[in-house]
Amino acid sequence: MVTLLLVGVVAGSTVSLAVAGAPFTTPILLVSAQEDESTSLSATAETYDGQVAAEDGDVTVTGSASTDGDVVVVFVGSRGTIVASTLPVTDDRFFTSIDLDEMENGFVDGIVVSPGADETFGTPGDGPDSGSDLAEYVNTLSGRDLTQDQIREVLLEVTVDGDASDDLATDVPFVLAQGNLRLTDVVPNGNRQASGVRPIAAGETMLVRGLTNRQPSGVLVEVTVEGPNETLGPVAAEDWETDGVWTVTLDVPSDATPGTYTVIADDGEQSADVDVEVVAQRAEPTASETTGTAEDGESPTATATATPTPASTQSTTDPTPEPTPEPSLEPTTTETQSPGFGPLVGLAGLFGLLVLARVVRWQ
């Protein structure tokens, strides 16, 4: 939590808070208690990837203001170059593109100023009254060899910081830089959340993603992929949001030659390239392919499982002489019963012989 204590601040003045890590200051507009609460001002300078490309030559400013007069947009370059423009307000809205051909690259301090309820700038009767008068006055400051901060201070003195002024002001800073084109990601389209450069399999769709600070109007990012034996594309990214992120997709043929492919992006002014590996089609089968293979019995796993089965059967068959077959020889049990009569017959025969021997002796 950040606690702010503002002491001795004049109503209607602008206070800038320097936030650690933030590239710009954040304006706070203090509105006079006597001012109509319906007055308001907001504005933005359109940037891409946080910048305005010098090649585009202009910047678009949009906003809203509750005033019947004009608003004035002032851009001050890092070496004191000034571009001041008057914008009409229609239905509380304003919109325009401002030429930056004379502006040097670097941080550009942008300020939009709107008259308050009195519809005049600064102290009434003292200084520029209309928007055109203010823009003309600010443009003359470029010949005074003032720094960027000094020009800002003078502008605020004759507007929001003037005695009894009810003007409003808001900041629209940006960085003016050379056009920039970058390749950030080359990944399979089926894994769009991935980042960096990942191998792409033949037969897959390649997703190419990058960043630019160019405005999409009138600019195309064209992407081609050059391989060992073939070229994919070109395909073009035609539109992107203010974050500057653009994307394209390219289909990699299923018979594409595996190897190193070079992805090239070009917007007509800048280009970027990165190498990516295209590999053979993925070896791992899909779920349906796995099911089909198992049903056909062609899986190496199924063959390996079937091989030990005969061995197990043979080892069970070998011990044929073991007690297992003996119960099937039921006659053994039957013969075991017949010896019960055999001894009786033998005894009877022996007894007969003894009797016959005695008879013979008696004779």
Image (cartoon, helix red, strand yellow):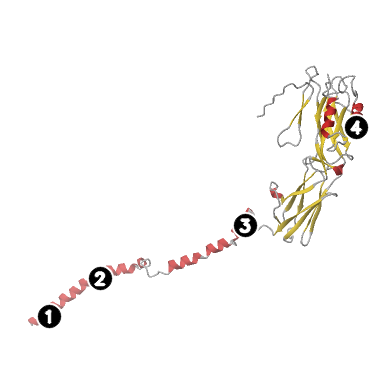
- Residue drawn 83% across the image and 27% down it: 156
Asked whether the beta carbons under mark 1 and mark 3 sit within 8 Å of each other, the answer is no
Q: Point out the frontmost of discs 4 and 1.
A: 4
Instruction: Specify the label residue 339 is tagged with.
Output: 2
Q: Quadrant of the N terminus?
A: top right
- Depicted 284 relative to depicted 1: above or below: below
Looking at the rendered structure, the kind of residue marked 2 is Pro
Cα distance in 3D space between marks 2 and 4:
140 Å
Instruction: Specify the label residue 28 is tagged with.
Output: none
Q: Which residue is mark 3?
A: 292
For marks 1 and 3 on the same chain, the one whose residue lies earlier in the sequence: 3
Asked whether the beta carbons under mark 1 and mark 2 sit within 8 Å of each other, the answer is no
Q: Sort mark 2 into few (<14), some (14-19) or many (20+) by Cα contacts within 10 Å.
A: few
Element type where label 2 sits in the image: helix
Q: Sort mark 3 into few (<14), some (14-19) or many (20+) by Cα contacts within 10 Å.
A: few
For marks 4 and 1 on the same chain, the one whose residue lies earlier in the sequence: 4
> Residue 270: horizontal and vertical position, in percent?
83, 49
- Depicted 320 relative to depicted 286: above or below: below
- Depicted 347 relative to depicted 111: above or below: below
Instruction: Specify the label residue 357 is tagged with.
Output: 1
For marks 2 and 4 on the same chain, the one whose residue lies earlier in the sequence: 4
Cα distance in 3D space between marks 1 and 3:
93 Å
> Residue 251: horizontal and vertical position, in percent?
76, 54
For marks 1 and 2 on the same chain, the one whose residue lies earlier in the sequence: 2
Q: Which residue is mark 4?
A: 139
Q: Residue furthest top?
A: 34
Asked whether the beta carbons under mark 4 and mark 1 sit within 8 Å of each other, the answer is no
Can residue 202 be seen by looking at this rendering? no
Q: Quadrant of the C terminus?
A: bottom left
